[in-house]
Amino acid sequence: MKPGRFLCLAAFLVLLMGLDLLAGNGLGLADGLVFWKLRLPRMLTALVAGASLALAGLQMQAVFRNPLADPHIMGVSGGAGLGAAIVTLAIGTTGFSGLTMALAAFAGALLTSALIVGLSFRLRTTTLLIFGVMLGFIFSAISSILQYTAGEESLKLFYSWMAGSFSGTRIPELLGMAAALLAGLVLALCNSKGLDIILFGVQYASFSGASTRRIRVLAMLSASLMTAAVTAFCGPVGFVGIVAPHVARRLLGTSAHRPLLPAVLATGACLALVADILANLWKTPLPVGSTMALVGIPLIVLYLMRETVWK
Amino acid sequence: MEISIPHIGYGNRILVRDITFTVSPGECLLLAGPNGSGKSTLLRQLSEVGIPSKTASASLRPLPPRCAVPSQAMGPSLLQARGWAWVLEGIPTSVNCVLIPTGIPKIKGFSVREFIRTGCYRESDWAGRLRKETEQRLEESLELLGMTELADRDIATLSDGEFQKACIAVGLTRRAQVLLLDEPTAFLDVENRLMVLQTLREVASRTATAVIFSSHDLHDALKVAHRVLAITPDGRLVESGEENREAVLKEAFPSY
């Protein structure tokens, strides 16, 4: 554990929060309405969403003992996407608001998580990981079929959600995400020693007296809750969950979960803020899902190269 | 301690029958047998159910498939591994057995001290903190094993032999009365193999812990083992005295 580095991370986070408030098209900070109604909620959404997805990724990497596990890979985001697609594309937009779509996405993510938790009692972790990836592909395929047959108006609404954005979140939605983050964090804290021991293998954890089933259920519950809330309101945003835990481990020089939790939250928030700043530097804001991929993918490639080539 | 278990196996497959042997505090026992003979299964069974005291009627009975597990058979007495359906009945006391399985990964980002604390899952509070007395036992274990200077080193940087010693420290910190080790010398070179085996013998004699370890390195293992438990190809467990260790090994490995 390196406290100095954590302080640097915290300072960097504060700097990014300031920069994110400045980033945006047209009106400056001098306009109070823009600040209170647009920039501040957007910055807070990025902060909460990044922290939530990073924490979800950390727990999934521990229980699946796989450095590439995250809610996106495990099909949870795909489940949310399918939920949103069914409401907007199959049923149609008539009478449906953005909130209904968000609720459908939330339900889709939770149902997928429940399926994965249920199967985790029967399948080995590697098989479960493959199952999650396949599930994501199936959801994506169904969404594509629905898009093919949907009307123009429905498609527009669906695409704008799929692209991912931290803008336009209202205070109740932000509070909902923050509540999910708080609940997920409490679960992760209570489960931190379980997450530590499961890294050394399910067999070793069992012999040490840990209930591996309880550890998995708590971790998945925490991860699903946070992912479902974030995906529902911000759309599917990938890569934070994979990248942030690795960056945090490297920065702090520890894999023990309890000291790692605050660093993972801060790293996830930093990544989301960087993606949001990049998205809002242009005249027309870019989709956050794309800028996150541009930030996240080089970091993942760098990690994989370090692990496989340079060692 | 006299240990008596009718048989062990998976589902309907019985690997070893009529298991009866004795083990004393401070004794170092080698568990030998061909691949797949049931060494790991026996060690796992001993760790999961605990070794029953002599006064208890140590009967393990197989439950019919899909039979509900009686509520009194909760916790460690229930063999949770897939395919098992065995429940320990009516055992009033049991000895604290700690099993160190083979192939524990050296995860980067844990110091030796953190690794030992993590292994003490039952002995720690919800936040993973050990009680003062357990923390003191951790330091004593490190000192006994000559690892005090390595305590803050990342386990990923330890040699395989040093890591095995850290695993033994987990058992000592957990106050094992019987320390069970599944192939602790697997994948080790000669130097590290001898160092680990010598450590086991010292731990047994200095802490009055009974040590039972399985190994395929019979020649080296015999240098430290007081006695031998051998599983024969026809599924019997043969126990040696101090004098006839090699003769018993011959029963397990006819070409030995």
Image (cartoon, coloured by chain):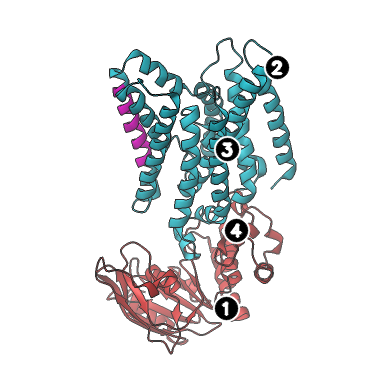
Check the residue under mark 2 and report the chain it is in.
Answer: A
Q: Quadrant of the C terminus of chain A?
A: top right
Residue B204's tag is: 1
Q: CA distance from mark 2 to mark 4?
A: 50 Å
Q: CA distance from mark 1 to mark 2?
A: 72 Å
Judged left or right of residue A171, residue A232 is: left
Give the magenta part as a residue range: A131-146
Q: Are marks 3 and 1 in contact (CB under 8 Å)?
A: no
Comparing labels 1 and 2, the label whose residue is closer to the camera: 2
Tell me the residue that label 4 is attached to: B115
Q: Earlier in the sequence, mark 4 or mark 1?
A: 4
Q: Is residue B48 above or below residue A55?
A: below
Check the residue under mark 4 and report the chain it is in.
Answer: B
Comparing labels 3 and 1, the label whose residue is closer to the camera: 3
Q: Earlier in the sequence, mark 3 or mark 2?
A: 2
For label 3, count other residues whose C-alpha is less than 10 Å away and answer few (under 14), some (14-19) or many (20+).
many
Comparing labels 2 and 4, the label whose residue is closer to the camera: 2
Q: Is residue B17 above or below residue A223?
A: below
Residue A178's tag is: 3
Magenta span: predominant SS is: helix
Tell me the residue that label 2 is attached to: A29
- For the point 61% across and 15% down, the residue is A281
Check the residue under mark 3 and report the chain it is in.
Answer: A
Q: Are marks 3 and 4 in contact (CB under 8 Å)?
A: no
> Residue B70: x percent and y percent?
34, 73
Q: Are marks 1 and 2 in contact (CB under 8 Å)?
A: no
User: Nearest the camera: A78 or A70?
Assistant: A78
Kind of residue at badge 3: Ala
Q: Please check the rendered image and state whether residue A19 is part of the magenta-colored stretch, yes or no.
A: no
Q: CA distance from mark 3 to mark 1?
A: 54 Å
In this rendering, does residue A7 appear at all? yes
Image colour assigned to chain A: cyan
